[in-house]
Amino acid sequence: QVQLVESGGGLVQAGDSLRLSCAGSGRTFSSYAMGWFRQAPGKEREFVAVITWSVGGSTRYADSVQGRFSISRDNAKKMLYLQMNSLKPEDTAVYYCAAGNNMRVGPSQYTYWGQGTQVTVSS
């Protein structure tokens, strides 16, 4: 069992940066691939980024955030991070962290989810 709690969302202007955090609990946190997803009003939940279970391991990004966002994790602290730079209004969404068994991009591949944190980017 893994419990996840996101934090760090807020209201920023286009071009600003924001760092999201996801605090995990449970003895098996470090054994899961960890991902970030987002959901804008009226849209489906979409993949943002994922990192393998090992610190410094493989990462994968959605084309829309490649080069602007960076995912990282600290297994000792049971923390997941998403550094978001050069934010755009289209990045506005509720951001969720999730734990899964592989680096898939489909939300259904992930077992555990946080409650989400709102990110709003004004133009």
Image: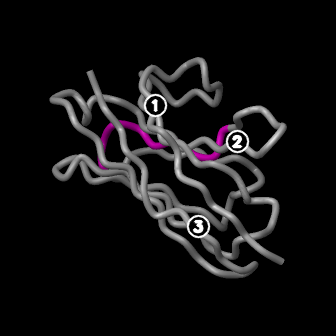
Q: Quadrant of the C terminus?
A: bottom right
- Find residue 92 and report its horizontal and vertical position in percent: 73, 59
- Disc 2 versus disc 3: nearer the observer: 2
| Depth check, front residue: 91 or 83 | 91
Instruction: Give the residue displayed 47% in from the left and 34% down from the top.
Output: 98
Res 7 → quadrant = bottom left
- Disc 1 versus disc 3: nearer the observer: 1
Instruction: Name the residue tied to disc 3.
Output: 84
Query: Label 1 vs label 3: CA separation?
Result: 20 Å
Instruction: Name the residue tied to disc 2.
Output: 39
| Depth check, front residue: 114 or 52 | 114
> Does 54 lie within the magenta span?
yes
Query: How many numbered circles does the render carry?
Result: 3
Q: Amino acid at mark 3?
A: Met
Q: Is residue 89 left or right of residue 8?
A: right
Pointer 1: residues within 10 angstroms few (<14), some, or many (20+)? many
Q: Earlier in the sequence, mark 2 or mark 1?
A: 2
Q: Is residue 62 left or right of residue 95?
A: right
Query: Label 2 vs label 3: CA separation?
Result: 16 Å
- Find residue 101 and report its horizontal and vertical position in percent: 42, 22
Q: Amino acid at mark 1?
A: Trp
Q: Which residues are magenta?
A: 47-55
Q: Secondary structure at mark 3?
A: strand
Res 69 → quadrant = bottom right
Instruction: Give the residue displayed 30% in from the left and 49% down from the top.
Output: 55
* Numbered badge on residue 113: 1
Instruction: Give the residue displayed 31% in from the left and 32% down from the top.
Output: 3
* Numbered badge on residue 86: none
> Does 31 lie within the magenta span?
no
Q: Amino acid at mark 2?
A: Gln
